[in-house]
Image (cartoon, grey):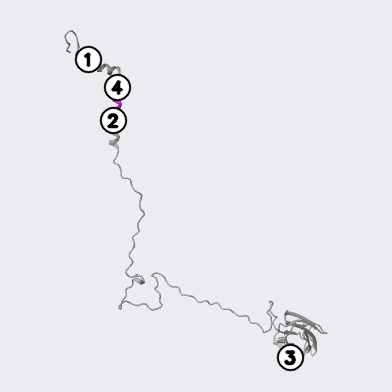
Amino acid sequence: MSVRPGGAETGEEAGGRTARRVIASAPWVVVLLGTALLVVMLVVAVLSFRGPERPTQSALAPPMSLPIPAAADTLAPEDSPSGPNSPSQPSGVSPTPSGSSAQPAIPSRTASAAAPSSAGVAPTSSAPEEPLSATDTGEVAVSYKVLNEDETSFRARLSVSNGGGESRDWRVELRFTGDVTGISASSGPGVSVTIKDTGWYLLSGTRPLDAGSSQTVHLRFSRTGGGVYPALCTVNGSACAVD
């Protein structure tokens, strides 16, 4: 160390001592410097361990469907070759798409049946009784005769006879037009009347008719017009005589 004459120090020495005193009297400066150095080292370490940045992936675009070219043998009708050498399609026949089969039209087979109707006889909900067979008819005969008439009614006589050799039941069916609206019957041995419909009547004896005997039934009909003779008169299924 150099000392000036007279014991005075130089300016350089005085500055060094001043700096040492400042450092010794202010330890926070050392701490600050050390902290800054640690921060710099930490930043360098973080940057060195960080990988390269990846580009941000954009949203996936929807898949694209490319048109598939049609096969050479499946041409649309409008793309079919035309010209004198091209095959012509029959007139009135429409092209059928490939892979599809045309279903033939099935005609309707529904048939309508017309219900039979008798002239002048109104339909009835109950089926008429089946006539007796020819073997049951035997020798029973019936005659129908008109006695008198007026504008609203007429009277008739029904004669039933059994020419067979044994007793037999009998049943007479009378059918008039719709103008005959009612009937009343009377007979000594007894008679039963069934009204099937307007102008449709069934008459039968209340007991079998003895062999060789006969029975007379007096009839009175009410009417609004029309004739006095029935359109149908049968006895046990056979036609009766109308006078």
Task: Decide which of tag 3 and tag 2 comes sooner along the chain.
Answer: 2
Q: Secondary structure at mark 4?
A: helix
Query: Based on the displayed image, in which of its 4 quarters is residue 184 positioned?
Result: bottom right
Q: Secondary structure at mark 3?
A: strand
* Whether label 1 touches label 3, CB < 8 Å: no
Q: Quadrant of the N terminus?
A: top left
Task: Decide which of tag 1 and tag 4 comes sooner along the chain.
Answer: 1
* Whether label 4 touches label 2, CB < 8 Å: no
Q: Residue furthest right?
A: 188
Relative to residue 117, is residue 100 depicted above or below?
above
Closer mark to the observer between disc 2 and disc 1: 1
Relative to residue 123, is residue 9 depicted above or below?
above
User: Where is residue 16 drawn, in percent x and y?
Assistant: 22, 17
Badge 1: how crowded within 10 Å, few (<14), some, or many (20+)? few
Instruction: For marks 4 and 2, give the CA distance.
Output: 17 Å
Q: Which residue is mark 3?
A: 241
Relative to residue 105, is residue 185 depicted above or below?
below
Q: Which residue is mark 2?
A: 40
Amino acid type of the residue tagged 3 in the rendering: Ala
Closer mark to the observer between disc 1 and disc 4: 1
Point 35% across, 71% down: residue: 78
Q: Nearer the viewer, residue 224 or 231?
A: 224
Q: Quadrant of the C terminus?
A: bottom right
Q: Which residue is mark 4?
A: 29
Amino acid type of the residue tagged 2 in the rendering: Val
Instruction: For marks 1 and 3, give the CA distance.
Output: 176 Å
Amino acid type of the residue tagged 4 in the rendering: Val
Point 31% across, 21% down: residue: 28
Instruction: For marks 4 and 3, give the CA distance.
Output: 156 Å
The magenta stretch is 33-39
Closer mark to the observer between disc 4 and disc 3: 4
